[in-house]
Amino acid sequence: MTQLLQERESRASLQKQICQTYSLPLVVVKANMHGEDKRSLIQTIVACEGYFELKKLNISHHHYTYTVEGLIFYLSIDLPIEQIKRICVDIEENHPLGRLMDIDVFNSHGQIFRRNLNLDPRQCFICNEVAHICVREQTHPILDIENFILETFKKHLQADDMQVRWQRMIQTALIGELIKPLGYGCVTLSDQGSHSDMDALLFIESAHTVSMEISKAFIFSKDFKQLREVGKIAEQKMFEMTNGINTHKGAIFLMLLVMAGLQHPDPVKHISGLCEDILSDFQVDDGSHGMHLHKQYGITGIRGLAKEGFEDLFTQGYPYFQLHPIDDTFLRLIRENPDTTLMYRGGQSLYNECREKAKRTENSVERIKFDRWMKIQGLSPGGSADMLSAILLIDLYSWIMEETNDEPTHKDRYRRYLGIE
Amino acid sequence: MMNRPTKTGIAGTLESNDCQVIVEPTKDEGLIIQIESVVKARFGKQIETAVRDTCEQLNLIGAIVSVNDKGALDFTIKARVETAVKRSL
Protein backbone atom coordinates (compact mmCIF):
# COMPACT_ATOMS: atom_id res chain seq x y z
CA MET A 1 0.00 0.00 0.00
CA THR A 2 1.36 3.43 -0.84
CA GLN A 3 2.19 5.95 1.87
CA LEU A 4 -0.65 8.14 0.62
CA LEU A 5 -3.25 5.39 1.12
CA GLN A 6 -1.88 4.68 4.58
CA GLU A 7 -2.03 8.35 5.52
CA ARG A 8 -5.63 8.54 4.32
CA GLU A 9 -6.57 5.62 6.56
CA SER A 10 -4.95 7.14 9.62
CA ARG A 11 -6.54 10.48 8.82
CA ALA A 12 -9.99 8.81 8.72
CA SER A 13 -9.45 7.52 12.24
CA LEU A 14 -8.14 10.91 13.41
CA GLN A 15 -11.28 12.54 12.00
CA LYS A 16 -13.50 10.05 13.78
CA GLN A 17 -11.63 10.67 17.00
CA ILE A 18 -12.02 14.47 16.71
CA CYS A 19 -15.76 14.14 15.98
CA GLN A 20 -16.22 11.94 19.03
CA THR A 21 -14.11 14.13 21.32
CA TYR A 22 -15.96 17.36 20.62
CA SER A 23 -19.38 16.05 19.48
CA LEU A 24 -19.41 18.77 16.80
CA PRO A 25 -19.45 18.70 13.02
CA LEU A 26 -15.92 18.54 11.62
CA VAL A 27 -14.75 20.34 8.49
CA VAL A 28 -11.62 18.98 6.80
CA VAL A 29 -9.91 21.37 4.40
CA LYS A 30 -7.25 20.31 1.90
CA ALA A 31 -6.17 20.69 -1.69
CA ASN A 32 -8.09 18.67 -4.26
CA MET A 33 -5.25 17.62 -6.51
CA HIS A 34 -3.58 14.49 -7.78
CA GLY A 35 -0.11 13.30 -6.86
CA GLU A 36 1.65 10.93 -4.49
CA ASP A 37 3.15 13.80 -2.49
CA LYS A 38 1.04 16.90 -1.98
CA ARG A 39 3.52 19.02 -0.02
CA SER A 40 3.84 21.75 -2.64
CA LEU A 41 3.50 25.52 -2.56
CA ILE A 42 0.19 25.67 -4.44
CA GLN A 43 -1.39 22.87 -2.47
CA THR A 44 -0.35 24.54 0.80
CA ILE A 45 -1.74 27.92 -0.23
CA VAL A 46 -5.01 26.39 -1.45
CA ALA A 47 -5.53 24.71 1.93
CA CYS A 48 -4.70 27.97 3.76
CA GLU A 49 -7.11 30.03 1.66
CA GLY A 50 -9.86 27.51 2.46
CA TYR A 51 -8.95 27.82 6.13
CA PHE A 52 -9.11 31.64 6.03
CA GLU A 53 -12.59 31.44 4.47
CA LEU A 54 -13.87 29.03 7.09
CA LYS A 55 -12.34 31.04 9.92
CA LYS A 56 -15.10 33.56 9.30
CA LEU A 57 -17.36 31.03 11.02
CA ASN A 58 -16.96 30.38 14.69
CA ILE A 59 -14.37 27.61 15.00
CA SER A 60 -14.49 25.83 18.35
CA HIS A 61 -11.38 23.66 17.93
CA HIS A 62 -8.74 23.40 15.26
CA HIS A 63 -5.93 21.10 14.35
CA TYR A 64 -3.65 20.58 11.36
CA THR A 65 -1.47 17.86 9.89
CA TYR A 66 1.27 17.94 7.26
CA THR A 67 2.04 14.62 5.58
CA VAL A 68 2.38 13.34 2.00
CA GLU A 69 -1.29 14.28 1.80
CA GLY A 70 -0.18 17.90 2.14
CA LEU A 71 -1.43 20.49 4.62
CA ILE A 72 -4.82 19.61 6.09
CA PHE A 73 -6.94 21.61 8.53
CA TYR A 74 -9.47 20.02 10.88
CA LEU A 75 -12.05 22.49 12.15
CA SER A 76 -14.80 21.68 14.64
CA ILE A 77 -17.65 24.11 14.14
CA ASP A 78 -20.74 24.56 16.29
CA LEU A 79 -23.39 24.98 13.58
CA PRO A 80 -25.96 22.60 12.05
CA ILE A 81 -24.11 20.20 9.74
CA GLU A 82 -26.32 20.93 6.67
CA GLN A 83 -25.65 24.64 7.02
CA ILE A 84 -21.90 24.02 7.23
CA LYS A 85 -21.99 21.74 4.18
CA ARG A 86 -23.80 24.40 2.14
CA ILE A 87 -21.18 27.00 3.09
CA CYS A 88 -18.39 24.61 2.12
CA VAL A 89 -19.98 23.79 -1.24
CA ASP A 90 -20.37 27.52 -1.83
CA ILE A 91 -16.63 28.07 -1.20
CA GLU A 92 -15.72 25.15 -3.48
CA GLU A 93 -17.89 26.57 -6.24
CA ASN A 94 -17.26 30.31 -5.90
CA HIS A 95 -13.88 31.05 -4.32
CA PRO A 96 -11.20 31.75 -6.98
CA LEU A 97 -9.27 28.73 -5.71
CA GLY A 98 -12.42 26.82 -4.74
CA ARG A 99 -12.17 24.29 -7.52
CA LEU A 100 -8.76 23.31 -6.21
CA MET A 101 -10.11 22.82 -2.68
CA ASP A 102 -11.56 19.77 -1.09
CA ILE A 103 -13.73 20.67 1.89
CA ASP A 104 -15.38 17.66 3.49
CA VAL A 105 -17.86 17.71 6.35
CA PHE A 106 -18.22 14.90 8.90
CA ASN A 107 -19.91 14.03 12.12
CA SER A 108 -19.51 10.94 14.25
CA HIS A 109 -21.87 9.02 11.92
CA GLY A 110 -19.73 9.70 8.86
CA GLN A 111 -19.50 12.14 5.99
CA ILE A 112 -22.24 14.33 4.56
CA PHE A 113 -22.23 14.46 0.76
CA ARG A 114 -23.62 16.90 -1.78
CA ARG A 115 -26.31 14.44 -2.79
CA ASN A 116 -27.60 14.35 0.81
CA LEU A 117 -28.61 17.98 0.23
CA ASN A 118 -29.82 17.33 -3.32
CA LEU A 119 -26.90 19.34 -4.74
CA ASP A 120 -25.22 18.49 -8.03
CA PRO A 121 -22.01 16.47 -7.80
CA ARG A 122 -18.65 18.20 -8.34
CA GLN A 123 -17.70 18.81 -11.91
CA CYS A 124 -14.40 18.04 -13.55
CA PHE A 125 -11.75 20.84 -13.74
CA ILE A 126 -11.52 20.68 -17.47
CA CYS A 127 -14.89 19.63 -18.87
CA ASN A 128 -18.37 19.68 -17.36
CA GLU A 129 -18.58 15.97 -16.77
CA VAL A 130 -19.09 14.66 -13.22
CA ALA A 131 -15.60 14.73 -11.67
CA HIS A 132 -15.74 11.07 -10.53
CA ILE A 133 -16.18 9.94 -14.12
CA CYS A 134 -13.19 11.86 -15.49
CA VAL A 135 -11.00 10.71 -12.60
CA ARG A 136 -12.02 7.12 -13.15
CA GLU A 137 -11.61 7.21 -16.91
CA GLN A 138 -8.49 9.39 -16.71
CA THR A 139 -10.00 11.38 -19.53
CA HIS A 140 -7.55 14.28 -19.38
CA PRO A 141 -3.77 14.18 -19.74
CA ILE A 142 -1.93 15.10 -16.52
CA LEU A 143 -0.33 18.03 -18.33
CA ASP A 144 -3.75 19.61 -19.00
CA ILE A 145 -4.67 19.22 -15.37
CA GLU A 146 -1.38 20.75 -14.19
CA ASN A 147 -1.87 23.63 -16.58
CA PHE A 148 -5.34 24.23 -15.23
CA ILE A 149 -4.04 24.24 -11.65
CA LEU A 150 -1.21 26.64 -12.47
CA GLU A 151 -3.47 28.98 -14.44
CA THR A 152 -6.15 28.99 -11.73
CA PHE A 153 -3.52 29.88 -9.16
CA LYS A 154 -2.09 32.59 -11.37
CA LYS A 155 -5.53 34.11 -11.94
CA HIS A 156 -6.09 34.13 -8.19
CA LEU A 157 -2.89 36.14 -7.70
CA GLN A 158 -3.76 38.47 -10.59
CA ALA A 159 -6.66 40.12 -8.78
CA ASP A 160 -7.93 43.30 -10.44
CA ASP A 161 -7.43 45.33 -7.29
CA MET A 162 -3.69 46.01 -6.96
CA GLN A 163 -3.75 45.95 -3.20
CA VAL A 164 -5.45 42.55 -3.19
CA ARG A 165 -2.85 41.41 -5.70
CA TRP A 166 0.04 42.42 -3.42
CA GLN A 167 -1.70 40.97 -0.39
CA ARG A 168 -2.05 37.59 -2.10
CA MET A 169 1.52 37.58 -3.37
CA ILE A 170 2.99 38.59 0.00
CA GLN A 171 0.86 36.10 1.88
CA THR A 172 1.87 33.35 -0.56
CA ALA A 173 5.54 34.28 -0.16
CA LEU A 174 5.37 34.33 3.65
CA ILE A 175 3.51 31.03 3.88
CA GLY A 176 5.55 29.56 1.01
CA GLU A 177 8.81 29.63 2.93
CA LEU A 178 7.26 27.27 5.51
CA ILE A 179 7.28 24.40 2.99
CA LYS A 180 11.07 24.17 3.10
CA PRO A 181 11.72 20.52 3.95
CA LEU A 182 14.22 21.30 6.73
CA GLY A 183 14.08 24.40 8.92
CA TYR A 184 17.61 24.30 10.43
CA GLY A 185 16.00 25.71 13.56
CA CYS A 186 13.27 27.73 11.88
CA VAL A 187 9.60 26.81 12.00
CA THR A 188 8.41 24.71 9.06
CA LEU A 189 5.09 23.04 8.32
CA SER A 190 6.48 19.81 9.72
CA ASP A 191 8.22 21.05 12.87
CA GLN A 192 8.74 23.91 15.28
CA GLY A 193 12.52 24.01 14.91
CA SER A 194 14.17 25.75 17.87
CA HIS A 195 10.97 27.55 18.85
CA SER A 196 8.79 26.16 21.61
CA ASP A 197 6.46 29.17 21.43
CA MET A 198 5.55 29.09 17.71
CA ASP A 199 4.24 26.65 15.16
CA ALA A 200 3.35 26.81 11.47
CA LEU A 201 -0.25 27.77 12.19
CA LEU A 202 0.86 30.87 14.08
CA PHE A 203 3.02 31.81 11.08
CA ILE A 204 0.13 31.19 8.69
CA GLU A 205 -2.20 33.40 10.73
CA SER A 206 0.50 36.03 11.10
CA ALA A 207 1.24 35.95 7.35
CA HIS A 208 -2.44 36.69 6.73
CA THR A 209 -2.49 39.58 9.21
CA VAL A 210 0.75 41.26 8.11
CA SER A 211 0.13 40.83 4.37
CA MET A 212 -3.18 42.67 4.82
CA GLU A 213 -1.24 45.62 6.27
CA ILE A 214 1.91 45.54 4.10
CA SER A 215 -0.11 45.51 0.88
CA LYS A 216 -1.64 48.87 1.80
CA ALA A 217 1.80 50.42 1.19
CA PHE A 218 2.06 49.45 -2.49
CA ILE A 219 1.22 53.07 -3.38
CA PHE A 220 4.13 54.39 -1.32
CA SER A 221 6.92 52.87 -3.36
CA LYS A 222 8.83 56.17 -3.41
CA ASP A 223 8.13 57.26 0.14
CA PHE A 224 10.32 55.66 2.78
CA LYS A 225 8.62 57.45 5.67
CA GLN A 226 5.19 56.18 4.66
CA LEU A 227 6.55 52.66 4.17
CA ARG A 228 7.92 52.75 7.69
CA GLU A 229 4.62 54.00 9.07
CA VAL A 230 2.77 51.11 7.45
CA GLY A 231 5.51 48.81 8.74
CA LYS A 232 4.97 49.99 12.31
CA ILE A 233 1.22 49.34 12.08
CA ALA A 234 1.84 45.92 10.53
CA GLU A 235 4.20 45.10 13.39
CA GLN A 236 1.67 46.19 15.96
CA LYS A 237 -1.08 44.09 14.37
CA MET A 238 1.31 41.15 14.22
CA PHE A 239 2.08 41.37 17.95
CA GLU A 240 -1.63 41.70 18.76
CA MET A 241 -2.36 38.62 16.70
CA THR A 242 0.47 36.50 18.11
CA ASN A 243 0.20 37.73 21.70
CA GLY A 244 3.61 39.33 21.62
CA ILE A 245 5.55 36.70 19.67
CA ASN A 246 7.82 37.96 16.91
CA THR A 247 6.92 35.95 13.82
CA HIS A 248 7.45 38.42 10.97
CA LYS A 249 9.08 41.59 12.26
CA GLY A 250 12.10 41.30 9.97
CA ALA A 251 9.95 40.03 7.13
CA ILE A 252 7.67 43.09 7.30
CA PHE A 253 10.60 45.45 6.78
CA LEU A 254 12.03 43.33 3.98
CA MET A 255 8.73 42.75 2.17
CA LEU A 256 7.85 46.45 2.25
CA LEU A 257 11.12 47.37 0.59
CA VAL A 258 11.09 44.52 -1.93
CA MET A 259 7.51 45.43 -2.89
CA ALA A 260 8.61 49.05 -3.41
CA GLY A 261 11.67 47.98 -5.39
CA LEU A 262 9.80 45.60 -7.68
CA GLN A 263 7.64 48.46 -8.91
CA HIS A 264 10.68 50.16 -10.43
CA PRO A 265 12.88 49.09 -13.34
CA ASP A 266 16.00 48.67 -11.20
CA PRO A 267 14.87 47.38 -7.80
CA VAL A 268 18.38 47.37 -6.28
CA LYS A 269 19.00 50.97 -7.20
CA HIS A 270 15.55 52.02 -6.08
CA ILE A 271 15.73 50.35 -2.67
CA SER A 272 19.23 51.62 -2.13
CA GLY A 273 18.00 55.16 -2.90
CA LEU A 274 15.09 54.80 -0.50
CA CYS A 275 17.39 53.60 2.27
CA GLU A 276 20.15 56.13 1.73
CA ASP A 277 19.99 57.42 5.30
CA ILE A 278 18.94 54.24 7.02
CA LEU A 279 22.14 53.79 9.03
CA SER A 280 21.24 56.92 10.98
CA ASP A 281 18.77 54.61 12.77
CA PHE A 282 21.69 53.50 14.88
CA GLN A 283 21.92 56.95 16.46
CA VAL A 284 18.82 56.14 18.49
CA ASP A 285 18.78 52.95 20.57
CA ASP A 286 15.44 51.27 19.92
CA GLY A 287 16.36 48.17 21.92
CA SER A 288 16.12 45.90 18.88
CA HIS A 289 18.33 42.87 18.15
CA GLY A 290 19.90 44.77 15.29
CA MET A 291 20.76 47.67 17.59
CA HIS A 292 22.24 45.38 20.20
CA LEU A 293 24.52 43.73 17.64
CA HIS A 294 25.52 47.04 16.14
CA LYS A 295 26.63 48.31 19.54
CA GLN A 296 28.49 45.10 20.32
CA TYR A 297 30.11 44.24 16.98
CA GLY A 298 29.47 47.20 14.70
CA ILE A 299 27.30 45.01 12.48
CA THR A 300 24.81 46.87 10.31
CA GLY A 301 22.56 43.82 9.71
CA ILE A 302 19.44 44.11 7.61
CA ARG A 303 19.76 47.92 7.50
CA GLY A 304 23.18 47.58 5.90
CA LEU A 305 21.75 45.18 3.33
CA ALA A 306 18.87 47.57 2.64
CA LYS A 307 21.30 50.40 2.08
CA GLU A 308 22.86 48.28 -0.67
CA GLY A 309 19.40 47.60 -2.11
CA PHE A 310 19.49 43.90 -1.18
CA GLU A 311 21.86 43.37 -4.02
CA ASP A 312 22.66 39.75 -3.24
CA LEU A 313 18.95 38.91 -3.05
CA PHE A 314 18.16 40.23 -6.52
CA THR A 315 21.37 39.40 -8.37
CA GLN A 316 22.41 36.11 -6.72
CA GLY A 317 19.71 34.70 -4.43
CA TYR A 318 16.80 34.85 -6.83
CA PRO A 319 18.66 33.50 -9.89
CA TYR A 320 20.01 30.69 -7.69
CA PHE A 321 16.47 29.79 -6.61
CA GLN A 322 15.34 29.56 -10.22
CA LEU A 323 17.79 26.72 -10.78
CA HIS A 324 17.82 24.98 -7.41
CA PRO A 325 15.41 23.36 -4.94
CA ILE A 326 14.11 25.45 -2.04
CA ASP A 327 16.27 23.55 0.48
CA ASP A 328 19.47 24.43 -1.42
CA THR A 329 18.36 28.04 -1.71
CA PHE A 330 17.75 28.24 2.02
CA LEU A 331 21.17 26.70 2.79
CA ARG A 332 22.81 29.18 0.46
CA LEU A 333 21.14 32.01 2.36
CA ILE A 334 22.34 30.63 5.70
CA ARG A 335 25.90 30.50 4.29
CA GLU A 336 25.91 33.84 2.50
CA ASN A 337 23.38 36.12 4.12
CA PRO A 338 24.43 38.00 7.28
CA ASP A 339 21.65 36.87 9.60
CA THR A 340 21.32 38.97 12.75
CA THR A 341 18.56 36.75 14.15
CA LEU A 342 21.03 33.90 14.10
CA MET A 343 23.82 36.01 15.51
CA TYR A 344 21.65 37.42 18.27
CA ARG A 345 20.65 33.97 19.46
CA GLY A 346 24.04 32.37 19.17
CA GLY A 347 26.69 35.03 19.56
CA GLN A 348 29.57 35.46 17.13
CA SER A 349 31.40 32.18 17.65
CA LEU A 350 28.36 29.90 17.32
CA TYR A 351 27.29 32.01 14.38
CA ASN A 352 30.57 31.40 12.59
CA GLU A 353 30.45 27.71 13.42
CA CYS A 354 26.94 27.52 11.98
CA ARG A 355 27.93 29.16 8.71
CA GLU A 356 30.90 26.80 8.42
CA LYS A 357 28.64 23.82 8.98
CA ALA A 358 26.19 25.13 6.39
CA LYS A 359 28.98 24.74 3.83
CA ARG A 360 29.23 21.02 4.49
CA THR A 361 25.73 20.02 3.50
CA GLU A 362 26.18 18.20 0.22
CA ASN A 363 23.87 15.26 0.87
CA SER A 364 20.69 14.65 2.81
CA VAL A 365 22.47 12.86 5.68
CA GLU A 366 24.63 15.93 6.33
CA ARG A 367 21.60 18.18 6.05
CA ILE A 368 19.61 16.21 8.59
CA LYS A 369 22.63 16.29 10.92
CA PHE A 370 22.96 20.06 10.48
CA ASP A 371 19.24 20.51 11.13
CA ARG A 372 19.55 18.53 14.34
CA TRP A 373 22.66 20.44 15.45
CA MET A 374 20.91 23.79 14.95
CA LYS A 375 17.98 22.65 17.09
CA ILE A 376 20.24 21.34 19.84
CA GLN A 377 22.07 24.70 19.89
CA GLY A 378 18.72 26.50 19.92
CA LEU A 379 19.71 28.49 16.83
CA SER A 380 17.30 29.77 14.21
CA PRO A 381 18.23 31.50 10.93
CA GLY A 382 15.11 33.68 10.92
CA GLY A 383 16.70 36.38 8.77
CA SER A 384 17.46 33.80 6.09
CA ALA A 385 13.87 32.55 6.23
CA ASP A 386 12.72 36.15 5.65
CA MET A 387 15.06 36.34 2.65
CA LEU A 388 13.56 33.12 1.32
CA SER A 389 10.11 34.76 1.47
CA ALA A 390 11.52 37.75 -0.40
CA ILE A 391 12.88 35.45 -3.11
CA LEU A 392 9.43 33.87 -3.42
CA LEU A 393 7.86 37.32 -3.72
CA ILE A 394 10.24 38.25 -6.55
CA ASP A 395 9.45 34.96 -8.27
CA LEU A 396 5.68 35.37 -7.93
CA TYR A 397 5.85 38.96 -9.11
CA SER A 398 7.83 38.07 -12.23
CA TRP A 399 5.28 35.34 -12.95
CA ILE A 400 2.13 37.41 -12.70
CA MET A 401 3.64 40.23 -14.75
CA GLU A 402 4.48 37.81 -17.58
CA GLU A 403 2.59 38.47 -20.77
CA THR A 404 2.99 35.05 -22.33
CA ASN A 405 3.63 31.56 -21.11
CA ASP A 406 7.11 30.68 -22.11
CA GLU A 407 7.27 26.88 -22.32
CA PRO A 408 10.59 26.22 -20.47
CA THR A 409 9.85 28.71 -17.67
CA HIS A 410 6.42 27.17 -17.40
CA LYS A 411 7.97 23.78 -16.73
CA ASP A 412 10.16 25.33 -14.05
CA ARG A 413 7.12 26.79 -12.35
CA TYR A 414 5.66 23.30 -12.11
CA ARG A 415 8.73 22.23 -10.22
CA ARG A 416 8.75 25.23 -7.94
CA TYR A 417 5.02 25.56 -7.25
CA LEU A 418 3.66 22.06 -7.67
CA GLY A 419 6.75 20.18 -6.54
CA ILE A 420 6.99 18.21 -9.77
CA GLU A 421 10.61 17.44 -10.56
CA MET B 1 -1.85 -22.38 -0.74
CA MET B 2 -5.35 -21.00 -0.39
CA ASN B 3 -6.13 -18.12 1.94
CA ARG B 4 -9.25 -18.22 4.03
CA PRO B 5 -10.33 -15.36 6.28
CA THR B 6 -10.66 -16.10 9.97
CA LYS B 7 -12.04 -12.70 10.96
CA THR B 8 -13.36 -9.47 9.48
CA GLY B 9 -10.74 -7.34 7.73
CA ILE B 10 -11.39 -3.70 6.83
CA ALA B 11 -9.28 -1.30 4.75
CA GLY B 12 -9.73 2.07 3.11
CA THR B 13 -12.00 5.03 3.74
CA LEU B 14 -15.27 6.42 2.46
CA GLU B 15 -13.66 9.58 1.11
CA SER B 16 -13.75 10.76 -2.48
CA ASN B 17 -11.41 8.82 -4.76
CA ASP B 18 -11.06 6.06 -2.20
CA CYS B 19 -13.02 2.95 -1.30
CA GLN B 20 -13.71 0.88 1.78
CA VAL B 21 -13.28 -2.86 1.54
CA ILE B 22 -14.67 -5.33 4.07
CA VAL B 23 -13.64 -8.99 3.92
CA GLU B 24 -15.63 -11.46 6.02
CA PRO B 25 -15.37 -15.25 6.40
CA THR B 26 -18.15 -17.54 5.10
CA LYS B 27 -18.95 -21.15 5.91
CA ASP B 28 -18.38 -22.54 2.42
CA GLU B 29 -15.45 -22.05 0.05
CA GLY B 30 -17.13 -19.66 -2.34
CA LEU B 31 -16.20 -16.08 -3.02
CA ILE B 32 -18.95 -13.47 -2.96
CA ILE B 33 -18.17 -9.99 -4.23
CA GLN B 34 -20.50 -7.06 -3.56
CA ILE B 35 -19.91 -3.70 -5.18
CA GLU B 36 -21.40 -0.36 -4.24
CA SER B 37 -20.04 2.60 -6.19
CA VAL B 38 -20.74 6.23 -7.05
CA VAL B 39 -19.92 5.29 -10.63
CA LYS B 40 -21.54 1.84 -10.59
CA ALA B 41 -23.68 2.35 -13.67
CA ARG B 42 -20.64 3.04 -15.80
CA PHE B 43 -17.81 1.21 -14.13
CA GLY B 44 -19.47 -1.47 -11.95
CA LYS B 45 -18.20 -4.31 -14.15
CA GLN B 46 -14.63 -2.99 -14.32
CA ILE B 47 -14.49 -2.55 -10.58
CA GLU B 48 -15.79 -6.04 -10.01
CA THR B 49 -13.14 -7.45 -12.35
CA ALA B 50 -10.40 -5.57 -10.50
CA VAL B 51 -11.65 -6.89 -7.17
CA ARG B 52 -12.05 -10.47 -8.43
CA ASP B 53 -8.59 -10.49 -10.06
CA THR B 54 -6.97 -9.29 -6.86
CA CYS B 55 -8.81 -11.89 -4.77
CA GLU B 56 -7.75 -14.64 -7.17
CA GLN B 57 -4.13 -13.52 -7.11
CA LEU B 58 -4.30 -13.76 -3.34
CA ASN B 59 -5.89 -17.27 -3.58
CA LEU B 60 -8.79 -16.12 -1.47
CA ILE B 61 -11.62 -18.55 -0.71
CA GLY B 62 -14.52 -18.64 1.73
CA ALA B 63 -15.07 -14.90 1.83
CA ILE B 64 -17.55 -12.13 1.26
CA VAL B 65 -15.75 -9.09 -0.14
CA SER B 66 -17.82 -5.89 0.03
CA VAL B 67 -16.51 -2.80 -1.69
CA ASN B 68 -17.98 0.64 -1.11
CA ASP B 69 -16.35 2.75 -3.81
CA LYS B 70 -16.26 6.55 -3.82
CA GLY B 71 -14.58 6.94 -7.17
CA ALA B 72 -11.24 5.21 -6.57
CA LEU B 73 -8.90 4.23 -9.38
CA ASP B 74 -8.16 0.54 -9.98
CA PHE B 75 -4.75 0.62 -8.31
CA THR B 76 -6.34 2.07 -5.16
CA ILE B 77 -9.11 -0.55 -5.21
CA LYS B 78 -6.56 -3.33 -5.63
CA ALA B 79 -4.37 -1.99 -2.81
CA ARG B 80 -7.37 -1.66 -0.49
CA VAL B 81 -8.61 -5.21 -1.29
CA GLU B 82 -5.14 -6.61 -0.66
CA THR B 83 -4.85 -4.89 2.72
CA ALA B 84 -8.37 -5.89 3.79
CA VAL B 85 -7.65 -9.52 2.86
CA LYS B 86 -4.36 -9.51 4.81
CA ARG B 87 -6.15 -8.09 7.82
CA SER B 88 -8.82 -10.82 7.63
CA LEU B 89 -6.40 -13.75 7.76
Image (spheres, grey):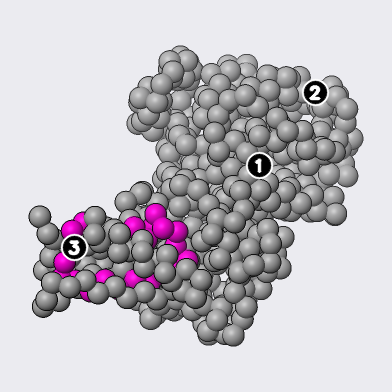
Q: Do labels 2 and 3 share a chain?
A: no
Front tag of 2 and 3: 3
Three-letter code, disc 2: Val
**Could you say where residue B18 lies in the image, as x and y percent from the top left?**
42, 63
**Residue contact between numbered discs 2 and 3, judged by CB atoms under 8 Å:** no
The stretch drawn in magenta includes residue B65 = yes
Mark toward the start of the polypeptide (2 vs 1): 1
Q: Residue A89 or A315: which is nearer the viewer?
A: A89
Name which quarter of the figure residue A237 lies in: bottom right
Residue at image point 61% right, 36% down: A416
Decide: is A394 above or below A49. Answer: above
Question: Callout 1: few (<14), some (14-19), or many (20+) C-alpha neighbours within 10 Å?
Answer: many
Mark 2 to mark 3 CA distance (whole Å): 69 Å
Q: Distance between the residues labelled 2 and 1?
A: 19 Å
Q: Are marks 3 and 1 in contact (CB under 8 Å)?
A: no
Q: Which mark is residue B21?
A: none
Residue A17 is drawn in which quadrant?
A: bottom left
**In the rendering, which numbered label is found on residue B60?**
3
**Residue at mark 2:** A268
| Highlighted magenta segment, given as a residue range | B58-78
Reply above or below: A271 against A10.
above
Q: Could you tell me which secondary element the residue under label 1 belongs to?
A: helix
- Do marks 3 and 1 share a chain? no
